Every structure is written in C-alpha cells, then in structure tokens.
Image: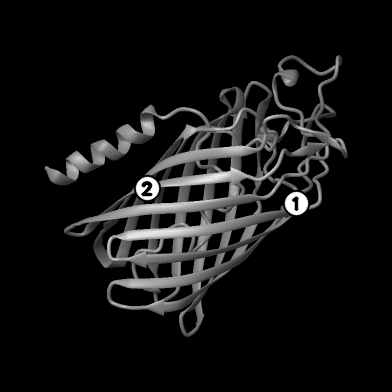
Amino acid sequence: MKLLFLSIITITIASFAVGQGCSDAGLCTTGGLDSGFGKSNPKTNLKYSTIFGLGEQNVFHITSQLELNIPVISSQVLQIKIPYNFTFGNLGNISGLGDLILSANQHLYSGENSSMQVVAGIKIPSNDANKTKDGFSLPMAYQTSLGTYDIILGINSMYKNWNFGLGYQHSFGNNLNKFEHRYDNPANFNNYNESYNLKRADDIMARIEYLVSINKTKIVFGAIPIYHLADDVIKGSQKVANSSGLTLNLIGKSHIFIKNNWIMEMVLAAPIIDKESRPDGLTRSFVAMISFSKSI
C-alpha cells in the first residue's frame, strides 16, 4: 500500500506540471549525473530504454536507446549511449539516428553511506541537423541530431538517502540547419521556432534527489534546475529573445529489481518553470521513460 501511494504521488507530480520537460541536450541524462545512488557496478551493464515526449506544436517524440556501461579500471566506468529517434507531427514523420554520447565516470570516493564521482563526456552529432521535406529544411523539432559537438562536465555526490549533482554543457559552433520563416514555406512550417545555423548557449544544471527504499524497489523524487546562460543565436548574429533563463523540472523515478539481475526503471519528468523560447526543438510538456537493464 505504501509503495502504491508513493507511485501515485510520483505520477501526479509529473502529470500536472506543464511546459518544457527534462529533455535537455544530454546534461540531465549523462551517466554519473543522472543519479548517484549505489556504488559503482563492477560488471558491464546493458540497458535498453524507450522514451516518450510531447514537444513543440504537439509533436510526439519516441526514442529507442541502447546504453552500455563498461568498467575499465578501478572505480571508473565508460558509458556509450546510442539513441534512435522517431518524430510524428503535422509536418510529417521523421526518424533517424540520434547523437552519440560517450562519457567517463570516475568514483573519487565510495563508502557505506556516501560517495562522490566526477564525469566528463562528449556528444557526437549523427548528422548536420538539416533534414528536409520536399526540399524545405525542417525545424529543429523534427531533426534527429542537434548538429554540434558538445562537452559535458560534472560532479555528483551521495549521502545516505540524498543525491546532489552539478553539471555543465558547452556546444562548439553552430549547426547547419536552414529552417527560417519564409512566405513560400508549406502550411504549418512557420508555426515553429526559427533555427537557421543555430548556436546553442551553455547550460548549467543542479540536481537534488531523495531516495525511498521498499523491499526490492527504490523510488526517487527530485528537482533539476537547468539554467541556459545566454540567448541562443541564429543566422550568425541574431539573438533569440527569451531563450536564456531557468527551467525547473520535477522528476520521479522507480527502480524495481526483478529476477536474474534484471532491473526495470520508470521515469516521469515535467517542469514547473520554463523558458519562453526554445529554438533547439527540445521543448517537452512531459517526458516518460521505461527501461530494462542487466549486468552481463
């Protein structure tokens, strides 16, 4: 009964929040920054996730993602994330390989009730973010890649039932997307944010989470503020007004340990504060994920 009650609270928090969900450019979900509970796993871990989100102009996003965590030396883990994205909206249906994320997670300390780890990662674009339809460049909401190389740095600390994290993401240069508002664009195109040669500003993130354990189930409640440090830039020098500022996300997660070392994870995230403009196409009104992982 207690487990059911906590699960209902988790779903309610995420369902009633509106705005831009925790679908960032990689900072929220890079290994070591996504949660700090538990000690480093001495075995290779394989994880498959399906992620759902509702974005700009009610575009529906589905991501199928493979994730591999490989211990390499003492207290260090390499992570590889390979997403494949599907997008469904009023401009059509688009699919393709997403951006690859490679990261290294180094435990500095791991004790009975506390741990600390540092993370460094790189996001590698799968394409130039300029997929087209009938010769017209599509907005970023339909692109399967952000089109830039990014670095991700962070630190995460756990103490008893509390988890704290800080992260930073920097994008190098601009992408090659050519979407802009034009008189000859097909119907509905001009309802989307312009993103011509988008240059994303840097992000900083904080994370605070609390863990409740019930038998073989772990339930985590948390808040993730992400601050976009400046306005994004398009067309070389044109700033996108109101694209900087704070997004505050609430998140609920459950980890259920099942037979033969399998773990099922469910995540719901949604914001209570968001920005007015998001030219990178990552706007979400909610994000939901279900995943299965196993040590191999």
Within 10 Å of disc 1 (Cα), the crowding (few <14, some 14-19, many 20+) is many
Nearer the observer: mark 1 or 2; the answer is: 2
- Whether pointer 1 and pointer 2 mark residues with C-beta atoms closer than 8 Å, the reply is no
Task: Give how far across and how far down residue 13 sits, in percent.
Answer: 34, 34
Along the viewing direction, whichever of 274 and 294 lies nearer the viewer:
274
In the depicted view, which residue is nearer to us: 211 or 295?
211
SS label for mark 1: loop
Question: Is residue 296 at least partly visible in the picture?
Answer: no
Q: Residue furthest bottom?
A: 74
Q: Which residue is at a point 49% across and 69% down the rendered structure image?
A: 69
Q: Is residue 135 left or right of residue 54?
A: right
Q: Amino acid at mark 2?
A: Gly
Asked whether, in this view, residue 92 is left or right of residue 113, the answer is right
Say what amino acid the circle numbered 1 marks.
Thr
**Up-down: is 105 above or below 250?**
below
Please give left or right for residue 51 compared with residue 208 in the image: right
Q: Is residue 80 above or below residue 288?
A: below
Residue drawn at x 40%, y 63% is 36
Quarter of the rendering occupied by the N terminus: top left
Q: Residue 168: horizontal and vertical position, in percent?
A: 61, 57
Figure quadrant of the C terminus: bottom left
Q: Tell me the residue at 46%/57% (across/down).
A: 34
Instruction: Indicate the secondary structure of the residue bearing disc 2.
Output: strand
Q: Earlier in the sequence, mark 1 or mark 2?
A: 1
Q: Marks 1 and 2, how far apart in space?
A: 29 Å
What label sits on residue 222 in the rendered view? 2
Question: Which residue, given by chain and number where applicable, does mark 1 sit on?
Answer: 148
